[in-house]
Image (cartoon, rainbow, N blue to C red):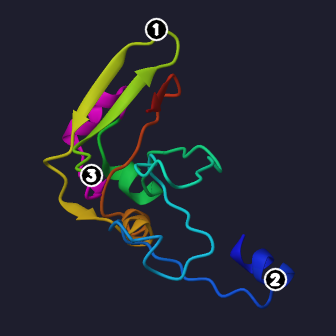
Amino acid sequence: MLADINKRWPQLSIYLNYGDENLDPYGDDYDLYVRMATASDSSLIARPLSAVEYWLCASPDYLQQAASIEEPADLAQHKLLEQRFRQGIDCWRFTHIESDRHERLDLSSAWFSTNSAPSLLQVAIDGGGSLPCRASCWYPR
């Protein structure tokens, strides 16, 4: 999307920050400030751009040697990777599509944690861990 924005508005300068620190949209020179979070400052004009979908995945190499996964509880026996934010998300929550049953998976056993999605993706691609859910009747919430 950024390349398309640049083609349309070549004079626009974009700063993309993957950090999860709270930046000051007033103190810096921002014309547009996009954040993946619930708006905490009611003086800002905020509009939702899109819903964020999370997908659990792992490399084919990892899945070949790992225990099978039929439901979220099976993930507890896998090498977990965690995307960590300052907000302190310490678990994955799942909802069963048909029964609306909820499950929670604690992430304290994750061997690798980072706030960088590209780094996390690379570790998963390299077979370093599990973010998988093969059971089609479950989705992360």
Question: What residue is pinned by disc 2?
Answer: 9
- Residue closest to the eye, 13 or 91: 13
Residue shown at 56% from the left, 77% from the top:
30
Q: Tell me which corner region of the image, top left, top right, bottom left or bottom right, holds residue 10.
A: bottom right
**Cα distance in 3D space between marks 3 and 2:** 34 Å
Q: Quadrant of the C terminus?
A: top left
Q: Residue at x 54, y 44 (%)?
A: 53
The residue where tag 1 is placed is 99
Horizontal and vertical percent for residue 104? 27, 29
The residue carrying pointer 3 sits among few (fewer than 14), some (14 to 19) or many (20 or more) residues within 10 Å by Cα, namely few
Q: Mark 3 sits on what residue?
A: 87
Q: Residue at x 28, y 55 (%)?
A: 82
Q: Is residue 35 above or below residue 98?
A: below
- Give x and y (percent) for residue 32: 62, 70
Label pair 3/2, CB-CB below 8 angstroms? no
Q: Quadrant of the N terminus?
A: bottom right
Q: Is residue 13 left or right of residue 122?
A: right
Q: Secondary structure at mark 3?
A: loop
Task: Measure the alpha-carbon separation of dots 1 and 2.
Answer: 48 Å
